[in-house]
Image (tube, coloured by chain):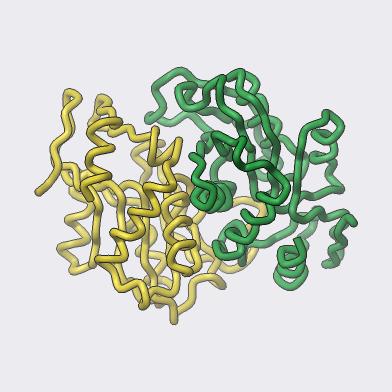
Chain colours: A green, B yellow
Amino acid sequence: MDELKARILSEGKVLPGSIIKVGSFLNHKVDTALMGRMADEFAKHFDISKISLILTIEASGIALASVCSYKWGIPLLFAKKAKSDNIENGLFCSEIYSYTYKKTVKVMVESEHLKSTDHVLIMDDFLANGEAIRGLTDLVHEAGATLEGIGIAIEKGFQGGGDKFRKKGIDIYSLAIIEEADDGSIRFRD
Amino acid sequence: MDELKARILSEGKVLPGSIIKVGSFLNHKVDTALMGRMADEFAKHFDISKISLILTIEASGIALASVCSYKWGIPLLFAKKAKSDNIENGLFCSEIYSYTYKKTVKVMVESEHLKSTDHVLIMDDFLANGEAIRGLTDLVHEAGATLEGIGIAIEKGFQGGGDKFRKKGIDIYSLAIIEEADDGSIRFRD
């Protein structure tokens, strides 16, 4: 998506460790108008009429997934990252390693909200090593639901997470795939 | 807002400790169509044309704030709850006590995204003791920005957080104020 790539180039910052900072429009301050146009892009690739549930993970995935959910009229479910007092029912649960926080984190959804009859589109703002998304696919499989695809705003292609899902035949679509990010320069996959 | 109150009565569950669970439509599974109508309700109360920034806090406030941001064409900023590697710049920071997680938590925004010229509407899905919202008002004051108001989906009136802000003359508007919640029964403030 050209508009997203242009925003990454003009506003993104590359930090040591190939961390790409896009907090001015994607995952801290959020340009929800851009997200509306991102929803339109996803809808060109995925058959939205098939989707019964959008699944994302807290926290920063919620903004993009909420705008898509609102535009498409499809409910949203966001997985939680740690057990809080407010979760009481049966859970679908997986464990992921968070490279951001350098620890293993539980991801979970209450089982009553993810049904075997659901056709699920997983969405997130970022995909790097793919741990968070792998955790979400675990939840979909645990529920016996159908995974229709994975929609990502920015994929860090050089970290290989997205290609792991492609090799499994999963329909993963990223609006911008960054192939190289160092010394402040960013190159996209063709 | 009658529709929201009806959903709370039909789907909400009261847990021990007057915890009100509305994870079927507000803060786990999310009915973003309802949130669009909630945005319309907020727009009857607040003068949206005055607002330059919506401020919320991760995680569950992001869904409601994103839909409002998208509908109103106003950017969104969500405060983060702990320092992660991806935050590098100057920060506005406050500390709050999280009753959900029973610990003190830092809330922060990068200072470049919250300007002294901003007119801020703080939004969240829930208000109980008001700690999270107090933390957000701290950030607004630290930035020298103007607080235009506070919009809340569900206020637990019996915990007093909302009334503390009202006494200070802050324009706080909650779409449903729960006055009593015990033994499975819920009563709203008139």
Q: In the image as oriented, which residue stretches furthest toward the bottom?
A: B117
At horizontal 30% and vertical 54% (from top left) the residue drawn is B152
- Residue B116 visible, this orientation: yes
Where residue A105 sits: x, y (%)?
61, 32
Depth order, front residue of A93/B75: B75
A13 to B25, vertically: above or below: below
Q: Quadrant of residue A107?
A: top right
Q: Quick check: A105 left or right of A84?
A: right
A33 to B35, vertically: above or below: below
Depth order, front residue of A136/A19: A136
A178 to B72, vertically: above or below: above
Q: Quick check: B140 left or right of A80?
A: left
A107 to A65, vertically: above or below: above
Depth order, front residue of A114/B156: A114
Q: Quick check: A80 left or right of B26?
A: right
At horizontal 22% and vertical 48% (from top left) the residue drawn is B176
Q: Quadrant of residue B134?
A: bottom left
At horizontal 54% and vertical 48% (from top left) the residue drawn is A72
Q: Quadrant of the C terminus of chain A?
A: bottom right
Q: Quadrant of residue B137?
A: bottom left
At horizontal 61% and vertical 23% (from top left) the residue drawn is A145
Where residue A29 sits: x, y (%)?
55, 63
Q: Quick check: A167 left or right of A146?
A: right
Where residue A57 sits: x, y (%)?
57, 39
How many numbered markers are drawn? Answer: 0
- Residue A12 visible, this orientation: no
